[in-house]
Every structure is written in structure tokens, then in C-alpha cells.
Image: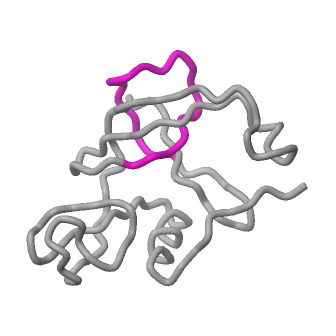
């Protein structure tokens, strides 16, 4: 059974292409200078449509996390549990939800960096692993 992949839209396509290239992109407002994430047409701070993609360092700190022990998405996901989801405070000042990989015993405040992992339908996912 195939797992669903993220929906790639015209707005998010540069983000997903950069993930395939091993780069993490976030958006930045040219008008007020504030970075933001998730991809959208206008700045959530000033509503300007003068936005651009910028490359993130891909490093940050765990703001919150949760251990997932059962598949909430049906049989296709049974082989993925248990796993850890987290909200990461990227060093650029934006928060990003993702998955933590390659470690256990995660805690709030741990430093992490992006790790690109193959996903469904040739989509590369930006997950996070322990920094250092």
C-alpha cells in the first residue's frame, strides 16, 4: 500500500525541488525583511507580496515534540511507527514542523540539523537529526 506524498503546488514547488538538491528553503519578505515558513504568496506580517526564497542554514532547536506510537493514517503507515514529530525553531527565526530521525531520547532544547530523506513518489523530505 502506497503512502500519500505531500501535495506539490506552484507555490511550494521551489521548496520541494531544493529538498531534492539537499537545500532547505524558507521565505523572506522583501518589504519588511521578516523570514517565514510555510510557503505562501504573501508575508504573514505585513501582507506584502514581495517575497523571495532564501536558503536556511538548516539548523535549529527543538521547540516541542511528540512520540507517535500508533498509526493514525491507516495500514500504509504501520511500518513507520514509532516515530517522533517536532516543531523546530530554525536559527533564522521561523518554526517548522518535521520529523526527528536517527536518535532517541529527544528533549526540548536539543540542537538539530536538517537531514534529507527519500519519501513517497520521488519526494525528498526534510527531517531533522542531532546536531554535532
- Looking at the image, is 64 positioned above or below residue 120? above
- Looking at the image, is 70 positioned above or below residue 105? below
Tally of numbered discs: 0
Name the quarter where the C terminus is drawn. Answer: top left
Where's residue 30, x and y in %? 14, 76
Where's residue 73, x and y in %? 75, 46
Instruction: Decide if residue 132 is on the left or right side of residue 115.
Output: left
Where's residue 37, x and y in %? 34, 60
Instruction: Decide if residue 9 is on the left or right side of residue 58.
Output: right
> Looking at the image, which residue is at 18% across and 80% down?
48
Q: Which quadrant of the structure image shows residue 67?
A: top right
> Looking at the image, which residue is at 35% across and 29% down?
111
Q: Residue furthest top?
A: 105
130 vs 93, nearest the viewer: 93
- Looking at the image, is 127 positioned above or below residue 121? above
Name the quarter where the N terminus is drawn. Answer: bottom right
Colour style of the rendered protein structure: one colour
106 vs 71, nearest the viewer: 71
* Residue segment shown in magenta: 96-115
Q: Residue furthest left?
A: 32
Amino acid at each position: 500500500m502506497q503512502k500519500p506524498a505531500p501535495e506539490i503546488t506552484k507555490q511550494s514547488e521551489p521548496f520541494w525541488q531544493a529538498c531534492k538538491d539537499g537545500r532547505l528553503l524558507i521565505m523572506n519578505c522583501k518589504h519588511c525583511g521578516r523570514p517565514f515558513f510555510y510557503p505562501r504568496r504573501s508575508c504573514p506580517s505585513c501582507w506584502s507580496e514581495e517575497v523571495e526564497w532564501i536558503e536556511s542554514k538548516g539548523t535549529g532547536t527543538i521547540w516541542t515534540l511528540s512520540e507517535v506510537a500508533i498509526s493514525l493514517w491507516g495500514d500504509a503507515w504501520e511500518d513507520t511507527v514509532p516515530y517522533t514529530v517536532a516543531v523546530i525553531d530554525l536559527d533564522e527565526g521561523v518554526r517548522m514542523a518535521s520529523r526527528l530521525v536517527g536518535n532517541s531520547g529527544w528533549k526540548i532544547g536539543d540542537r538539530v540539523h536538517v537531514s534529507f530523506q527519500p519519501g513517497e513518489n520521488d519526494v525528498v523530505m526534510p527531517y531533522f537529526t542531532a546536531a554535532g
